[in-house]
Image: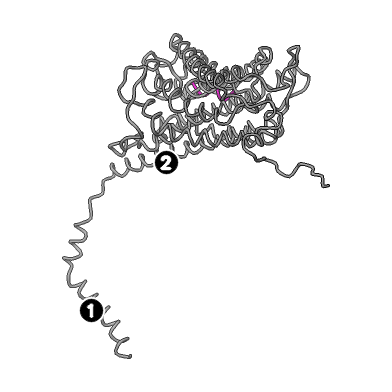
Amino acid sequence: MKNKWFKIPALIAAALVLGLASPSLAQEAVAAEPAFDAAATAGEWAYAIDNMFLMFCAVLVLFMQAGFALVESGFNSAKNTVNILFKNLMDLSIGMILYFIIGYGLMYPGDGNGWLAFGQFGIGGNGADVAEAGALTLQVDWLFQVAFAATAATIVSGAVAGRLKFHAYLVYSAVLTAFIYPISGYWKWGGGWLDQMGFYDFAGSLVVHACGGFAALAAAIVLGPRIGRFSKDGKSRAMPGHSLPLATLGVFILLIGWFGFNPGSQLAIVGKDNTEAVMLIAVNTLLAAGAGAVLAMVVTWIMHKKPDLTMAANGVLAGLVGITANCDGVTNVSAIIIGAVAGVLVVFGVKLLDMLKIDDPVGAFPVHGLCGVWGGIATAIFGSYDGCSSQAIGDYGNWVAQITGSIVIPIWAFVTMFILFTILKAIGMLRVSKEEELRGLDIGEHGEEAYNGFQIFTTN
């Protein structure tokens, strides 16, 4: 045993001697080390940072689904909560699969005729060939884009709450994310005819929000109002939501998520110009949201003699939608004005729907449709800031292009979705029965409740 332990230090000593006696081995090891390339290393770091930045922004946009779920369920009856949450879950789940299979290839086909083209099924190659600032993998690009597609789809959920059959909603969601949204998205973001014309929509006031908002309007018109929403003589009856705390929390989540939506659309953060653009975008986003809330509160306070939380909450979202098209190329003061106008528009948009007897429980059309169009027009009015991102320079002020895009995209979404919902109605797939609507879609459609245990049972 003593001999065994004695041999160990002896072996260590021998190894050290051999190492010192053979410097050529150490030299060979050093020679095998690759030469340090500072430029290549800096490029790889910039590449990693930009891709991580976009992935983080994509996650923030995906988190907005939680905000939509809370806003829509909170603004509606408790008996329909499961149905609304389920629709939000499935339009994300179904939408991401279909956007992967076909939607992404329709929206970014590479080459095309400007109107309709298809690139490939799935995502395709890896994207960037060189690791440098501004280069993105196609994987992270798809991740960011699918979050936008899911946002466009989920806008409709609240507008049809309480009366649309679940399977009809799944059909709508599949069609919008696979075809309707990608095609009009290609017209601008995929280099299509609107982009060639000079139309500008930085982060999607029209491409995303107006698309979803006008699809919601089509659905609400074809579907008809909820039972009891309007009296026989046409007067509007309030049908308050079951949880303003949930709805308000949802608005805060959407506000946070918008910092992925707008700043992420710069697609890079490395470099002085990109960093300054991202920070301008973030500040403009917040200012517009606050201005929308304040003006919506003031207008409703004047009209109804009391401040209204639901209108102020929608004012936040209205300001966010209005600034989304132009947040990279307007001054801070302009952002406040854009948000303030959006806050006023959303109030009068809700009043207009009441006059027309169109039932939109969460104000999806006034917030996303009406204010989305305002964002497109505001881009031509206010978009002249010299410090805007390089993507925006030269594209602002094109009134013909802005008005064209602000009309064509809403019409495309409205007409196609009106046709789809009309077909579903004709074949009996659209609206639940009167009994199911009165009882609640949670029980009628799903056989489960969001707030179980509140019934009063009697025993014989």
- Residue range highlighted in magenta: 318-325
Amino acid residing under circle 2: Met
What's the amino acid at mark 1?
Ala
Disc 2: which residue: 52
Residue 324 part of the magenta segment: yes
33 left or right of 295 in image? left
Q: Position of residue 324 (x, y in %)?
A: 51, 24
- On the image, the x and y values in percent for residue 249 come to 65, 36
Question: Residue at coordinates 49% horizontally, 24% vertically from top-left?
Answer: 208
Residue 103 lies in the magenta stretch: no
Q: Is residue 309 left or right of residue 123?
A: right
Q: Quadrant of the N terminus?
A: bottom left
Q: Is 294 rendered above or below residue 356?
A: below
Q: Check disc 1 and report the residue beneath it.
A: 14
Q: Quadrant of residue 188?
A: top left
Furthest residue in direction bottom, as rendered: 2
Q: Secondary structure at mark 1?
A: helix
The image quadrant of residue 306 is top right
Residue 268: percent from left, percent from top? 40, 33
Label 2 vs label 1: CA separation? 49 Å
Residue 24 seen in this snapshot? yes
Q: Nearer the viewer, residue 344 or 382?
A: 344
Q: Earlier in the sequence, mark 2 or mark 1?
A: 1
**Which colour assignment does the render follow?**
one colour
Q: Residues within 10 Å of mark 1 (few under 14, many from 20)?
A: few
Q: Which mark is residue 133?
A: none
Q: Is residue 326 visible?
A: no
In the rendered image, which quarter is residue 299 located in?
top right
Residue at the far top: name it.
400
- By secondary structure, the bulk of the magenta-drawn segment is best described as helix
Q: Position of residue 393 (x, y in %)?
A: 40, 19
